[in-house]
Image: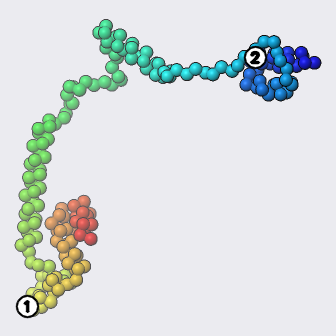
């Protein structure tokens, strides 16, 4: 019986079946000594270079060989050289000149608006501007007597008048910026 057990376990091990199960096989079939050695499981040897790295290296070598021969690699799809002029484009110098003119015009317009806002009458409390009143009554409605909320509201209104693009404009970005800044 011992010879039979040995042949079964060694047959399974020699065929590649249950190679990692050698200790389990000896427990299953008993402690049996065989005349030939049982093959051990081999570990996979890994190299540092992966398949992808190897393919990249081969591709790079081919490119270098072709470059030595004077053969350039093919151009990508829809390749356009850097020095190709763009049709219908405005030259940079012309764009900068236009920007400079527009900036100067906007600065002059803003200066006029600020001077107009500075020259106007002082705002009064409770929207009492434009009424004829004595100096004593005017002092009662002066903002210097008012609270912080009234002063901030008057500043916001003055700033919005300066930056608005048309009468009653409250939605343009500049006016919105003034409204949020003075809150």
Task: Judge left or right: residue 176 versus residue 10.
Answer: left
Taking the spot 8% from the left edge, 71% from the top edge, the residue there is 118
Locate residue 143: give its quadrant.
bottom left
| Residue 155 image point, x, y percent | 18, 73
Residue lying farthest to the right in this orientation: 1
Residue picked out by circle 1: 134
Q: Nearer the viewer, residue 16 or 168?
A: 16
Mark 1–mark 2 Cα distance, whole angstroms, equals: 120 Å
**Image quadrant containing the C terminus:** bottom left
| Residue 24 image point, x, y percent | 79, 28
Task: Judge left or right: residue 157 versus residue 54.
Answer: left
**Image quadrant containing the N terminus:** top right
Task: Judge left or right: residue 57 versus residue 86.
Answer: right
Residue lying farthest to the top in this orientation: 69
Taking the spot 70% from the left edge, 19% from the top edge, the residue there is 40
Taking the spot 48% from the left edge, 21% from the top edge, the residue there is 49
**Residue 57 vertical placement versus 95 (above, below):** above
Residue picked out by circle 2: 38
Dot 1 lies on which element? Answer: loop
Q: Is residue 174 visible?
A: yes
| Image disc number at residue 146 | none
Task: Judge left or right: residue 45 versus residue 6.
Answer: left
**Residue 22 vertical placement versus 117 (above, below):** above
């Amino acid at each position: 019986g011992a010879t039979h057990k040995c042949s079964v376990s060694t047959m399974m091990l020699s065929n590649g079946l249950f190679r990692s199960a050698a200790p389990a096989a000896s427990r299953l079939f008993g402690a049996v000594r065989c005349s030939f050695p049982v093959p051990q499981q081999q570990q996979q040897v890994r190299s540092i270079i992966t398949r992808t790295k190897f393919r990249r290296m081969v591709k790079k070598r081919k490119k270098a060989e072709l470059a030595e021969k004077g053969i350039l690699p093919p151009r990508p799809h829809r390749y356009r050289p850097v020095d190709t002029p763009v049709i219908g484009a405005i030259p940079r110098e012309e764009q900068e000149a236009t920007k400079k003119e527009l900036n100067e015009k906007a600065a002059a317009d803003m200066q006029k608006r600020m001077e107009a806002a500075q020259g106007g009458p002082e705002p009064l409390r409770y929207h009492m501007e434009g009424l004829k009143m004595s100096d004593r009554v005017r002092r009662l409605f002066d903002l210097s007597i008012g609270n912080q909320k009234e002063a901030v509201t008057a500043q916001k209104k003055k700033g919005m008048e300066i930056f608005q693009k048309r009468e009653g404009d409250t939605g343009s970005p500049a006016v919105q910026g003034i409204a949020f800044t003075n809150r």
